[in-house]
Image (cartoon, helix red, strand yellow):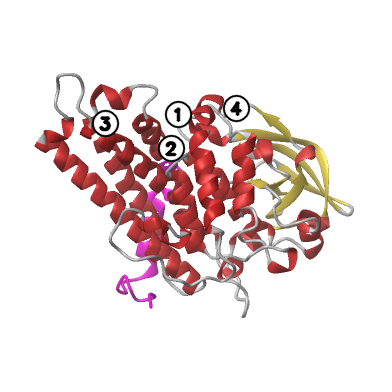
Amino acid sequence: MPVSAGLQEGQRSGPLPAERSGGPLAEEDVLQAARAAGRGAVAADRDRRLAPEVVAALREAGFARHFVPRRWGGREGGFAELVAATALVGGQCPSAAWCGMLWAAHGRYAARLPEEAQRELWGGGPDTLIAAALVPPSGEARPVPGGWLLDGRWDCVSGVDFCDWVLLAAPVPDAPARVLALPRSDVVVHDTWRSTGLRGTGSNRVEVCAVFVPDRRSCALGEVLGAVVEPGASSARQASAQLAGGLMFCAPALGAARLALRSWNRWARTASAGRPAALGDTTLQRALARSAAEIDAVALLLARAAAGADAEPTAPGVEAVNRRDAAVAAEVLVEAVERLFRMGGAHARDDTSEVQRAWRDVHTVAAHGALRLDAAACAYAAWGDREDGADRP
């Protein structure tokens, strides 16, 4: 199955639009990463971190280099194929998909740093793993000759145990917040991640104590998160953080929902000793049909939104529509998996159940600030009263 068709897995609809701004993710490498993630999924949930072999497979698949500029050996890829690949890996292990997606996204942010900093990150190759904590800024960066003195703590830094570099956003006295790039050796990682879902992401707290960061490894937070118009540049290099951020965050939940659906379907169709298969019950048939249709609908919604982000990275209204679509998609996935969990009996509640693990993961993804419907609805309402498709081709 082509990676570009990954969002339509199991559907009758066609593949994603072929719009790309760089070389495609290697199909077989993404599939290998998904298989490795599936083999390590139970251990990742138990150990609260990914296995080294899963990290290696994600790196080999090209997640870290996906948005890296071509001059450093990256592919400057598009949003649509990353969302598809993330959902594909998420269908085996949502925690692995979450980390892979963020390693890609953080490469996009790092490409906004000064040229000298980019050379430090990617001069030896484009597969550098970058963790980040940008919103909200934390700690404090104080100006000193030649750079900044950084102190503070930052929570929920996903995949930090395996990263090479860390991007941290910090307030600055009487000035806009800044993003500072630090080698992993400059931060202390505290084992704090005890979430109910996405347990394998190892989203621990990091601490920095009076570390000097030179000017060449820093820029304003607004320069990292905002949109820029750069003729000839890839869509990702021009796009704001919010244009496709919600879509990328939602992709692991789409994978988790597919995982729940597959596992639930196997259970419902299997007859146990002396008892017919549960799927003979019309109530369960309705639950299956509705949840499957909702999951397919989310795949189509994300595919459309990601294609729009690739085609029109700075068009008015596209960001507002995409934020709306991602937030609504997350709510629909919660409802679809919640229905399966509720109708799955004791099977779904067992601590070895894939349905239960996927249920926890979907709820955790949907709780992320980038997927909150209130903020997305406010932005969409503020955009204006034009028709939904006004900025779509």
How far is disc 2 from disc 3 in space, using C-alphas? 24 Å
Q: Secondary structure at mark 4?
A: loop
Give the number of the mark in front: 4 or 3: 3
**Between tags 3 and 1, which lies in front?**
3
Q: Residues within 10 Å of mark 1 (few under 14, many from 20)?
A: few
Going by the numbered disc 1, the residue's amino acid type is Thr
Q: CA gap, disc 2 to disc 4? A: 16 Å
Q: Looking at the image, which residue sits at the far top?
A: 273
Q: Residue at x 88, y 54 (%)?
A: 146
Q: Distance of mark 2 from mark 1, alpha carbons?
A: 7 Å
* Residue occupied by mark 2: 364
Q: Is residue 388 above or below residue 347?
A: below
In-image side of 16 versus 164 (left or right): left
Quadrant of res 112: bottom right
For the image, the number of numbered tags is 4
SS class, disc 1: loop
Amino acid type shown at disc 4: Thr
The residue at which mark 1 appears reads as 196
Label placed on residue 267? 3
Give the residue type at disc 2.
Answer: Thr
Q: Identify which residue, 9 or 301, lies in the foreground.
A: 9
Residue ID at (42%, 70%): 17
Task: Please tell me which of labels 2 and 3 falls first in the chain.
Answer: 3
The mark lying in front, picked from 2 and 3, is: 3
* Magenta span: 364-393
Q: Earlier in the sequence, mark 4 or mark 3?
A: 4
Task: Confirm whether the magenta stretch covers residue 312.
Answer: no
From where the camera sits, is residue 202 visible? yes
